[in-house]
Amino acid sequence: MRIVLTGGGTGGHIYPALAIARHCLQRKPSCEFLYIGSNRGLEKDIVPQAGFRFESVEISGFRRKLSLDNLKTVIRFWQAVGRSKKLLREFQPDVVVGTGGYVCGPVIYAAAKLGIPTLLHEQNAVPGLTNRFLSARATVVAVSFPGNESAFPKAKKAVYTGNPRATEVTGADPAAGRSSLGLDSDTPLVVVVGGSGGARSINTCMAEMADRVRELPGTHFLFITGKAYYDNTAARIAELGEQPNNLTVVPYVDRMPDILAATSLIVTRSGASFMAEITALGIPSVQIPSPYVTNNHQEANARSLQQGDAAEVILESELTGERLFDQIRKLIEDPIRREYMAGQAKKFGQPDAAERIYQHLLAITAKPAR
Ligand SMILES: CC(=O)N[C@H]1[C@@H](OP(=O)(O)OP(=O)(O)OC[C@H]2O[C@@H](n3ccc(=O)[nH]c3=O)[C@H](O)[C@@H]2O)O[C@H](CO)[C@@H](O)[C@@H]1O
């Protein structure tokens, strides 16, 4: 099967596309891939590093208020449709898979115009603008939550599959995750991370908490700042004096599944892929939903885990380093509660998501019987 993947901007759109690709390769090693992304998104680095061929189209997003930039966006869109058609004609895919973000727009649109089957994957309970626009043109729309098919009333066909990152992390190697941090097997690991791009408020907490991690000497802390916030956060932590031995601070982790498989407690934003990963692995979490996303969908994600007693939630408006560290400490000192939360989290897990998507890909690329 020849597959074009598209989607990007943030990790939340890119990693599901790569998870689909890797699962397809496992099921059918002869699969071939081309990833079409934007040169402005994280995909331009992540995709080639993951070993997939990458081509770019130029695209930008609409501004919500009237502006001349929107005219430029429309012109860029049509230019990107033209370039996408050229790339698709050259690569001759059997199917095009889109996982959201602006760049999906021209690529899926071009594929539909060329009569190539398309599958659109939506990670969030509230669909993004691009996926809503594309849903009527896609052959299948795959949603991440059971019953959420109705979020795409114009789709020709909407199906529940779950998020393919759930499948990917279940195959991860906790020993590799631990050894990348130089930890032995029974040291509890607390990971503190914003989304794929980091989060300013969570990084402020990292700086406020950095000295207090000494209060839990038997626990290792991994602070992932996001690339844009690393220099500032690391400098603020350095001002406190010598960094505690049980603290590692990094801008980004490339092999996140292995780290997650070794994690005892995670503090994170409530983006869709992180949620899928946490629940597939059964990791207790403290959720700090971003208030800056469409329809406040991260708080809805976080609350669903909280109602299932799988997570604690701290809203950004209530967040301080002290409050966060007290919450972490309480959970680290209570392994029974953590174990219970882990079991509750797993009830939300969707480890067969990638296989479900693969089956839909087989169905939409099957040649009709003569
Ligand atoms: C602010 C914003 O717009 N956030 C959205 C964005 O989040 P964002 O891009 O942060 O996406 P998610 O939280 O869904 O996923 C982050 C992904 O990046 C990976 N990762 C993260 C850090 C790191 O160092 N290494 C690494 O590999 C995680 O394992 C995960 O797979 O897309 C999601 C999916 O559409 C949405 O639900 C979020 O609301």
Image: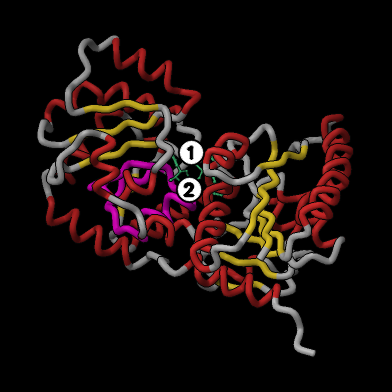
Residue 217: x %, y % from top left: 11, 31
Label 2 within 8 A of ligand 1 by Cβ:
yes
The stretch drawn in magenta includes residue 136: no
The stretch drawn in magenta includes residue 283: yes
The CA span between labels 2 and 1 is: 9 Å
Q: Nearer the viewer, residue 325 or 265?
A: 265
* Chain part drawn in magenta: 262-288
Residue 262: x %, y % from top left: 26, 47
Name the secondary structure under disc 1: loop
The residue where tag 2 is placed is: 271
The residue where tag 1 is placed is: 196
Q: Quadrant of residue 253?
A: top left
Quadrant (top left/top right/bottom left/bottom right) for the N terminus: bottom right
Residue type at mark 1: give it.
Ser
Q: Nearer the viewer, mark 2 or mark 1?
A: 1
Look at 44% across and 47% down and name the residue there. Answer: 270
